[in-house]
Amino acid sequence: MNYGKWALILTPVVLIAGFIAYASVSEHAAQNKAKSFCSNFKPGDDFNAAMDQVNAAAASDKLLNKENHLAIMFSSYDPQSVYACEIDGKDGKIIKVHYSHLAQE
């Protein structure tokens, strides 16, 4: 049996399967982080406390607008695929919490 031939055939297959598994896990992890972050807040909660949590969180990117909008983003293996939790506020209270997937092309 020629093991070199099989190694030559199986190596690319294993590498491709490994990349697909990594990509899937990475995408799922970014999605879960954004959904989990959003689940911490609901309308009526303190907007400033949400701002503190956004500020303290480890994320790919953050947008802090003290007036009325916060956004925290989590990237997967693909920087074009970003999952976000956006929080809108008014008069110091949260009025809207929104999870979204931002796929840029």
Image: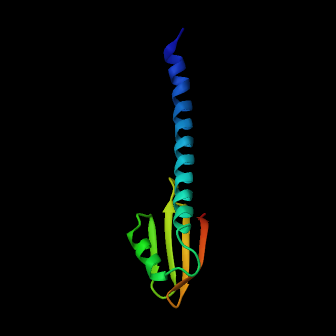
Q: Is residue 105 positioned above or below 54 on the image?
A: above
Residue extending furthest bottom?
Answer: 91
Residue pictured at 50% horizontal, 60% vertical? 75
Q: Is residue 38 positioned above or below 47 on the image?
A: above
Residue pictured at 57% horizontal, 42% vertical? 20
Q: Is residue 53 positioned above or below 22 on the image?
A: below
* Chosen colour scheme: rainbow
Q: Is residue 92 visible?
A: yes
So how many labels did they put on this image? 0
Residue extending furthest left?
Answer: 56
24 and 3: which is toward the camera: 24
Where does residue 57 sit, x and y in percent of width and height?
A: 41, 66
Residue pictured at 52% horizontal, 68% vertical? 40
45 and 6: which is toward the camera: 45
Quadrant of the rendering where the N terminus is positioned = top right
Where does residue 39 sit, x and y in percent of width and height?
A: 56, 66
Quadrant of the rendering where the C terminus is positioned = bottom right
Where does residue 9 sit, x and y in percent of width and height?
A: 56, 24
Where does residue 71 sit, x and y in percent of width and height?
A: 51, 74
Q: Is residue 45 positioned above or below 26 on the image?
A: below
Rendered image quadrant of residue 42: bottom right
Residue pictured at 53% horizontal, 79% vertical? 45
Q: Is residue 82 visible?
A: no
